[in-house]
Amino acid sequence: MFCYQCQETFKNQGCKIQGVCGKNEDTANMQDLLVYVTKGLAEVINKRGEVEEKYYDRLSNNLFVTITNANFDTEAILNLVKETLAMKDELLKDVESDKLSEFARYRSDDSDELRRKAIEVGVLNIMNEDERSLTELVIYGLKGMAAYNHHANVQGFRDEKVDKFLAYALEETTKACTDITKLIDLVMETGSHGVMAMALLDKANTETFGNPEITEVDYSAGKKPGILISGHDLNDMKMLLEQAKDSGVDIYTHSEMLPANYYPEFKKYDNFHGNYGNSWWSQNEEFEKFNGPILMTTNCIVPMKKNNTYRERMFTTGNAGYPGCKHIEADLNGKKDFSEIIELAKKCKAPTNLEDIKVVGGFAHKQVIDLADKVIDEIKKGNIKKFVVMAGCDGRHKERSYYTDFAKALPKDYVILTAGCAKYRYNKLGLGDINGIPRVLDAGQCNDSFSLVQIALALKDAFGLDDINDLPIEYNIAWYEQKAVIVLLALLSLGVKNIHLGPTLPAFLSPTVVNFLVENFNISGNTSVEKDLEEMTR
Ligand code: FSO
Ligand code: SF4
């Protein structure tokens, strides 16, 4: 195995024996094969021109499965490989096979042969370091885009341009190409389609569940048994709330599901209790204490400790998977039956209380733009000097305390704009407000970084500026997995410069690619809180 797709990769070089995330060699290889056959399917889709939506769905789902911490179930991934090859065969009928690449020509339904092939198709097959770096940058961006696309698709929203770009770009990565300029163009195109995918998901979420609104979220535990739902899939959240509404069981969010608390549609449910716990990496301890069933709708799953007590009460759904945990499939209409989880919850103890705290969030674009006059007034009066976008991911490494220290050290006239699980590093610090405007404005999940861009564009218009970089906004972004990669590429495609990216720069960026990003976008890694603060408060 060789994997260097996330921020926690071994020694910031690559996981070669076992993933730091817990992914073992077999799973890693099988994920490589899934990406390989997905590229083959994409090529055949492109040759056919028009195909049914289910083939595009397959591209997004497969890429989503290979995102860090989403799916640890090797057998389930092997089955996806087989299904993908079978779907490709359906499309191959009218395609001349001598015009196809090895990715598209490959076929087998034999598990042993597929396991053998899985060892051969890793990222190190691209020998040229810069070509590999840019190709993987595109692939990781596509994985993030695929995740957002999938969430929109299951709500019945599609953008043909996103689907077609996914197929196009996947095929492009099969072509040996050492033309760096061409690959950089593909990276930037990936970013601009990332904006479209985030816009699509924003439309899907807000048209289906309403616009997020300012909400004080309760983190305390109630007296009734509960179900904890984690991950990013709001459609699953809706189905669970609906099915559990008269059951006497409370629903709690964990980690990236926290922003569900901000949506009007979910607030209607009396048994929606609030949020429980913190970001994804704290789940081993917090899932123990929750006492009831847990539903993982997407990443981030942390491998269970040997002596865990929650394997039997953790369920996965969608593209998430974990060996030994029951997986809830959707029926042909996309409906999921969560009755087994609800029945199990009734027999469980209520959650152990972790903290009695309430935290305010819900500052997506509509809510902030509704407050625009007030915000602009405070900027003009000099009460708000700058915004700092601190969106992205949290992670388990100690060095991430940088973000807590940075937030604490920011001058009192600075406001943090956040989205994603990065917020757990500073959302409970009690950083106060500026004449009623909280100093931490949480827009929602990582995909709601789109909201932060909308807010920036609205401010640019309000101040009559030509360039988004002339705004009083700094970017100090924390990344972990591939959804953060598409958020980064989306920002670059919009022309955002001077981004600080940490806690470390991606291992998959070669020195040539880092130079390109520095020269064209003035990207930098983190140094120390003091130095970065000095630079960002000039
Ligand atoms: Fe976090 Fe995990 Fe949302 Fe990621 S829970 S790290 S960028 O999956 O997707 O922010
Ligand atoms: Fe390593 Fe990250 Fe890949 Fe897991 S996802 S194997 S931690 S690089």
Image (cartoon, rainbow, N blue to C red):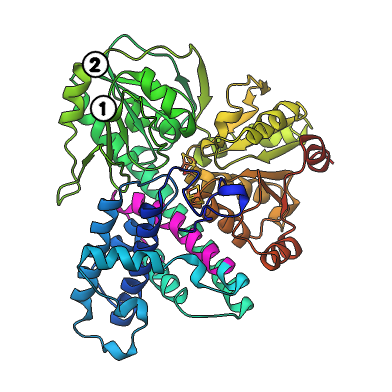
Task: Give the residue at the far top of this rendering.
Answer: 223
Which x, y percent locates residue 216? Answer: 48, 21
Relative vertical location of residue 487 with respect to residue 259 in this rendering, above or below: below
Query: What is the count of numbered marks?
Result: 2
Task: Please say whether residue 144 is one of the residues in the magenta stretch.
Answer: yes
Relative vertical location of residue 467 with respect to residue 442 in this rendering, above or below: below
Q: What residue type is labelled 2?
A: Cys
Query: Are the two marked residues, 2 and 1, in contact with CB atoms closer than 8 angstroms?
Result: yes
Q: What residue type is labelled 1?
A: Arg
- Is residue 460 visible in the rendered image? The answer is yes
Which x, y percent locates residue 13? Answer: 61, 54
Relative vertical location of residue 92 with respect to residue 439 in this rendering, above or below: below
Q: In which quarter of the image is the C terminus?
A: top right
What segment carries the magenta color?
Answer: 133-161
**Category of crowding for the residue at label 1, using alpha-carbon neighbours closer than 10 angstroms: few (below 14), some (14–19), many (at least 20):** some
Judged from the image, the secondary structure of the residue bearing numbered disc 2 is loop
For marks 2 and 1, the one nearer the N-term is: 1
The CA distance from mark 2 to mark 1 is 10 Å
Q: Which of 418 and 87 is in front in this view?
A: 87
Disc 1 beta carbon < 8 A from ligand 1? no
Would residue 26 appear left or right of 531 to someone viewing this image?
Answer: left
Q: Which of 464 and 525 is in front in this view?
A: 525
Q: Mark 2 points at which residue?
A: 348
- Is residue 453 visible in the rendered image? The answer is no
**Dominant secondary structure of the residues highlighted in magenta in the image:** helix
Task: Please say whether residue 88 is one of the residues in the magenta stretch.
Answer: no
Would residue 385 appear left or right of 195 to someone viewing this image?
Answer: right
Q: Mark 1 points at which residue?
A: 313
Residue visible at 52% across and 73% down in the picture: 126
Residue visible at 37% across and 31% down in the picture: 264
